[in-house]
Image: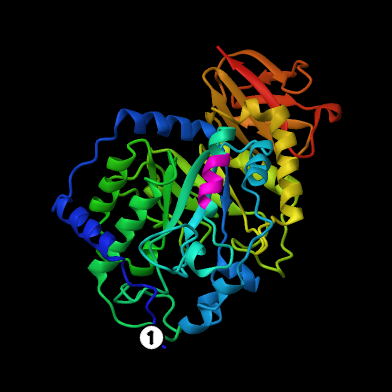
């Protein structure tokens, strides 16, 4: 059976060609607009966001890479949308859950590597409105709910596509998927430009575009200069991030780290420490071990692990984008909901030490991190014990108290640093916070 669903609509093909022709033919230096600089400041202060990996892959309950991992052919995979009918999806509930958890923004997958569009696009019929029984645009509902609650909306967009014939030549993944044909790379670039134009004109003000998949074809000409200029022209405040695991490229507005704190380089694809730039930063992580819904994933992180990861992220000067993978019926796993409730409870008490902070003057370690707002230094002690020593700390102190009880901390300076104690009654299993007012 011939596949026809990827053909462009005639009226949009003309629009895409026109857009392509008016793009500058050479790269230009990027000078962010005033709105963009303000958005960067907001982003750096936000500290906590919700990542949502959701698509037709959730039907199989084996994560978002199931098409490649099981080498599901194009004709076979195209049956999945007919089973995708998330009748329990409630955008208002999702946004309220995120807001109650203390999250300031949501980033949702609009199109993942399987090439299925989770929005009403005119560029292909392979989308939730035209190819699923649900027949509704989930992004429209989410955009309305986010605006109502004051939550910024970001869009994840995959550069990689295992379904579109024009994603050609192939990259390093998806090569075992049967039914893929040859195509035209320039048409694929035009396709992406057209979809990005839709995303930035049909859903109100967008906080940012979160690109992924560059690593599949490292030597490809992704036309970033044209794509980034298109985004900034349509919505100047819209922040651009790209999960390419390299140093920042011209036109990007924040730097992201996948499952890794900046400079840690524990993942095989992680950026090297010397590649860390000065732009706002974000680390993304999962609640269990999967991004997309995985029925058998039992590796659920504890409340302590998740809260401490948020604290560590702030100590490293980066946001935490924490992921949920909704089920095919539109509900979010109860375990994930409960975890987010616990984080929200913690932030309701201690959020002052996280939101709007920068990484503090104390270098992060396994035992502690520090966050800072001007002369206020918050020392987060992550492993309870009575006696602490901060080597090399010789900054003058005006006041030193336990954040929760406001009791005075007993401390003394030595020739080598600062000594202080935390009595058992002041210790917290998750995070004992010391507030220091510097002179």
Mark 1 surroundings: few (<14), some (14-19) or many (≥20) residues within 10 A? few
Question: Is residue 144 found inside the magenta-colored segment of the image?
Answer: yes
**Number of marks:** 1
User: Which span of residues is magenta-colored?
Assistant: 139-145
Which colouring convention does the figure follow?
A: rainbow
Q: Residue under circle 1?
A: 2
Q: Which residue lies furthest to the right in this view?
A: 425
Q: Can residue 400 be seen in this view?
A: yes
The residue shown at (20%, 42%) is 29
Could you tell me which secondary element the residue under label 1 belongs to? loop
Secondary structure mostly seen in the magenta stretch: helix
Left or right for 413, reference 395: right
Q: Horizontally, is 244 left or right of 295 in the view?
A: left
Q: Residue at x 51, y 48 (%)?
A: 140
Residue 257: where, in percent of width, then height?
A: 48, 51
When asked about the image quadrant of residue 246, the answer is bottom left
Question: Vertical placement of 158 versus 185: above or below?
Answer: above
In the image, farthest residue toward the left: 25
| 158 vs 309: above or below | below
Camera-side residue: 179 or 296? 179
For the question of whether residue 219 can be seen, the reply is no
Percent across and percent down for residue 69 are 54, 78
């Amino acid at each position: 059976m011939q596949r026809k669903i990827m053909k462009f609509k005639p009226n949009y093909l003309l629009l895409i060609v026109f857009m392509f022709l008016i793009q500058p033919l050479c790269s230009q230096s990027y000078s962010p607009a005033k709105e963009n600089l303000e958005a960067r400041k907001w982003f750096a202060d936000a500290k906590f966001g919700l990542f949502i990996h959701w698509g037709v892959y959730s039907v199989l309950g084996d994560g978002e890479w199931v098409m490649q991992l099981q080498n599901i052919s194009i004709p076979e995979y195209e049956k999945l949308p007919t089973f995708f009918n998330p009748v329990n999806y409630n955008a208002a509930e999702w946004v309220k859950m995120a807001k109650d958890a203390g999250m300031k923004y949501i980033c949702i997958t609009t199109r993942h590597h399987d090439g299925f569009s989770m929005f009403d696009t005119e560029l292909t019929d392979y989308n939730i409105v035209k190819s699923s029984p649900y027949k509704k645009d989930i992004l429209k509902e989410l955009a309305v709910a986010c605006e109502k609650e004051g939550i910024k909306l970001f869009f994840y967009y995959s550069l990689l596509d295992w379904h579109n014939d024009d994603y050609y030549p192939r990259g390093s993944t998806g090569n075992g998927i049967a039914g893929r044909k040859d195509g035209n790379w320039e048409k694929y670039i035009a396709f992406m430009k057209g979809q990005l134009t839709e995303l930035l004109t049909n859903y109100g003000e967008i906080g940012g575009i979160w690109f992924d998949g560059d690593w599949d074809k490292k030597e490809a000409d992704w036309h970033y200069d044209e794509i980034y200029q298109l985004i900034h022209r349509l919505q100047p405040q819209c922040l651009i991030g790209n999960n390419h695991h390299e140093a920042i490229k011209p036109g990007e507005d924040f730097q992201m780290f996948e499952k890794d704190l900046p400079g840690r380089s524990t993942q095989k694809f992680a950026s090297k420490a010397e590649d860390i730039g000065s732009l706002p930063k974000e680390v993304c992580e999962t609640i269990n071990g999967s991004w997309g819904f995985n029925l058998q994933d039992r590796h659920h992180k504890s409340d302590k692990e998740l809260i401490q990861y948020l604290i560590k992220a702030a100590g490293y000067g980066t946001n935490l984008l924490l992921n949920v993978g909704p089920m095919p019926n539109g509900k979010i796993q109860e375990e994930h909901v409960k975890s987010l409730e616990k984080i929200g409870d913690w932030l309701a008490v201690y959020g002052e030490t996280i939101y709007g902070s920068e990484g503090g003057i104390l270098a992060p370690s396994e035992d502690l991190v520090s966050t800072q707002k001007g002369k206020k230094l918050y020392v987060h002690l992550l492993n309870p014990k009575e006696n602490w020593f901060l080597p090399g700390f010789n900054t003058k102190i005006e006041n030193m108290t336990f954040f929760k009880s406001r009791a005075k901390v007993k401390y003394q300076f030595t020739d080598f640093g600062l000594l202080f104690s935390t009595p058992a009654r002041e210790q917290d299993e998750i995070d004992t916070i010391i507030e220091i007012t510097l002179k």
